[in-house]
Image: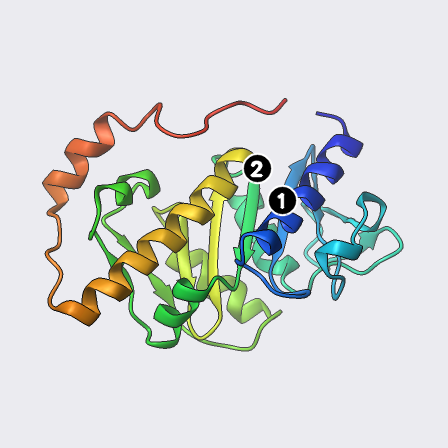
Amino acid sequence: MNEQTIREEVVAAYQELGREGMNKGASGNVSARCGDHMLITPSGIPGAQMVPEQVAKIAMGDASGAWEGPCKPSTEWRFHRGILATRQDAGAVVHAHAPFATILSILRKPIPAVHYMMAAFGTTEIKCSDYTCFGTDGLAKMVLEAMEGSAGCLMANHGMVVAGPNMTRAMWLAGELELLASQYYHSLLVGEPHILSAAEIEETAKSFSSYGPQAAED
């Protein structure tokens, strides 16, 4: 994909998060790998007002966060860059303040294997990171630790983040994580949810290599 197409994809994904109620206003952010650079949504611009030319471009190897473009990048560029720079399986990153994921993050409750769809994340538990101020190196470090071995995590008192090999997959995972959060939250209201075992999740994972959107974007 050329840079302009990736820019359009980043904006479209961010706007979809708003339509789906996963973000409000200018909350959350989306990024995608573009060669040895990262393209990320700009800071403080609502999806309805965002255009591809406003997407910021950051060199993956530049820890200073220096950007190209008319608008400064999202304050969360640090964990986006950290994920894309350290994980070869990550081509796109989605961060959202989705309602149920955020509720669980406020409760500091990781999501256990309440549903077999947990297998899509390559783990038996969606962890919740510790809390620190947004837009900091400390938060980036915490997010990377919580996402180790997983395609997603909760961010304490903040929201969620997922990574996928492409934007299609990352957006799908964001929706699945929010659904798992909702299922877990509501099951806790009724009683004690039954948690699937690691063996049961592993069995599901064997047939998940081709489950869900997988289209390569190149």
Q: Where residue 215 sits: x, y (%)?
A: 51, 23
Q: Residue at image x 54%, y 34%?
A: 168
Residue at which label 1 appears: 13
Q: Is residue 194 above or below residue 165?
A: below
Q: Is residue 186 left or right of residue 82?
A: left
Query: What is the number of the mark on residue 118?
Result: none
User: Looking at numbered disc 2 in the image, what kind of residue is underneath it?
Assistant: Met
Q: Is residue 135 left or right of residue 69?
A: left
Observer-nearest residue: 164 or 36? 164
Q: Where residue 136 sits: x, y (%)?
A: 60, 70
Q: Marks 2 and 1: CB-CB under 8 Å?
A: yes
* Dot 1: element: helix
Residue at which label 2 appears: 167
User: Looking at numbered disc 1 in the image, what kind of residue is underneath it?
Assistant: Ala
Q: Where residue 120 sits: x, y (%)?
A: 33, 39
Q: Quadrant of the N terminus?
A: top right
Work out whether residue 46 can be spotted. yes
Q: Where residue 173 sits: x, y (%)?
A: 43, 43
Q: Is residue 101 left or right of residue 88?
A: left
Tell us which disc is closer to us: 2 or 1: 1
